[in-house]
Image (tube, helix red, strand yellow):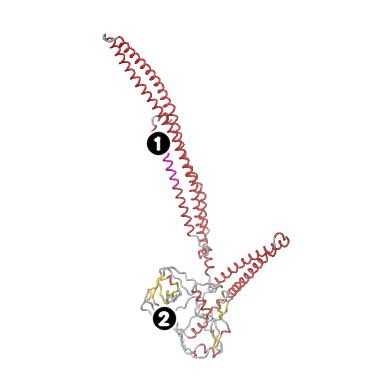
Amino acid sequence: MSWGTELWDQFDNLEKHTQWGIDILEKYIKFVKERTEIELSYAKQLRNLSKKYQPKKNSREEEEYRYTACKAFLSTLNETNDYAGQHEVVSENMTSQITMGLARYVQELKQERKSHFHDGRKAQQHIETCWKQLESSKRRFERDCKEADRAQQYFEKMDADINVTKADVEKARQQAQLRHQMAEESKADYSSILQKFNHEQREYYYTHIPTIFQKIQEMEERRIVRLGESMKTYAEVDRQVIPIIGKCLDGIVKAAESIDQKNDSQLVIEAYKSGFEPPGDIEFEDYTQPMKRTVSENSLSNSRGEGKAEPKFGGKSKGKLWPFIKKNKSPKQQKEPLSHRFNEFMTSKPKIHCFRSLKRGLSLKLGATPEDFSNLPPEQRRKKLQQKVDELNKDIQKEVDQRDAITKMKDVYLKNPQMGDPASLDHKLTEVSQNIEKLRLEAQKFEAWLAEVEGRLPARGEQARRQSGLYDVQTTPTVNNCAQARESPDGSYTEEQSQESEVKVLAVDFDDEFDDEEPLPAIGTCKALYTFDGQNEGTISVVEGETLYVIEEDKGDGWTRIRRNEDEEGYVPTSYVEVYLDKNAKGAKTYI
């Protein structure tokens, strides 16, 4: 099977077919290029996706990644990033192993094809030239034969005519011989050219053309083989990254299997545990017994007359129900007896103890965090202080190591003065020592706060007894005028009841009942535009789309006071809500 013998007369069709083969190769190259662009684009999108969901540094998201589920998600992001890298590898390998190689091969193929068909056209032109020579000699031989024939006929005519002179007859005879000689020469020339043409034609059809077509056939077969090899490479490039992609997927599965719901639950406890104990039971107060409403006849006067205190509530406190939860206020609530009110007054936390507490409450409202973390519950404060102490100790250790290194270097300089001047290290040594001293003072300050917090975290039984609010009423009744504001090292306060702060209550007539503090009236409504966590004291959490009541509008500090129901109220950032003020409310502004 050879194109030279089977397709000897299909020169033009072979030329078209080989051009089509090159077009197919260029089309495949374009396909691979577009595939590499898709791989790069996909890898870029995967990397951007992974980067988009990576936790931001120094943000709350970093703390969230302590949980095993979040760690697994982070591992998924990292594996996705590695997965994107494999698509980049696919693109690079296809470009280097297929696209670039095929592009060079196509150029070489075009040059080779051009050379082969140039040789073919040259052979065609040669045989056409031989054919033209043959035709020319043939026409000349034909013409000479006709001329010799006419010259012979003219001679015979002149020779038969008696009126023609002998000289004219001789001239006609010479002309006829000359024409015969020219015819013979043309015949010989035609015969020679014919033999030469036949030889050239045999060479053309049996040697030159088969050789050229065979080379074209081999070129085309090489093109086909190269295309097949490129397709195999195309598949192998993908196959090579499959094990690594499998490892990425295995990593995601392993991360998913590492999720520990129990551990995450324990982390939630550690993150939000306040350290407070639940409130004790509320004692039943019997209202069926007639009770006298004057101060002289209440339990306080009876206790003063008897000279000893009788705990009315069996050692349980009715005042403080739960930390940071406001007392339920209802306009329909029945008034309580003076004894309960007085006991609640003694056990409840004063709203504002002094100017420092007011200042701290304002700073918490504005989002500032005290240095001693006094805005946090005891357990959370202890964790923050412990973390701060550990960080300071690490910094101290680094400075100590640096001081030791400088000291050793100074000793080396003292022993070998040629290596350096020992005095040049004194300034650095003094600076490091001062840093160590500053860090130690800072650590001592935080350790003092930590010791204070740990000392104030009683055992469960002790804390339950402390919350029970057991008060012994003396002959001369005494109450705490104010919770003692004892300063912490940074100037914050801690509330403790002190016997020195007790003052005597004058024997005056109290009203038989204390009126409940009336809740502020609603001056409008608001709709939450965004979700607000409300972690600081005095704030309230809201959910996007939630509708609440406005009880105090923004005073210029960027906070609006709102109420969800009779039990829950607090501040939210004004920019987080859309306020609709009631125009008929007292003091309400006319804008929305």
Q: Does the magenta stretch include residue 314?
A: no
Residue on which disc 2 sits: 331
Establish if 592 lies above or below 133: below
In the rendering, which numbered label is found on residue 227? none
| Residue nearest the viewer, comparing 568 with 415 | 415
Find the magenta span and give its range.
Answer: 12-34
Where residue 418 appears, x then y in whole percent?
72, 59
Alpha carbons under labels 1 and 2: distance apart: 99 Å
Q: Which of marks 1 and 2 is in front?
A: 1
Where residue 42 appears, x then y in whole percent?
46, 52
Question: Tag 2's secondary structure?
Answer: loop
Taking the spot 53% from the left edge, 68% from the top edge, the residue there is 271
Establish if 564 lies above or below 34: below
Q: Which amino acid does label 1 sit on?
A: His
Question: Tag 1's secondary structure?
Answer: helix
| Residue nearest the viewer, comparing 389 with 275 | 389
Give the overall secondary structure of the magenta segment: helix
On-image quarter of the N terminus: top left
Establish if 258 lies above or below 554: above
Residue on which disc 1 sits: 17
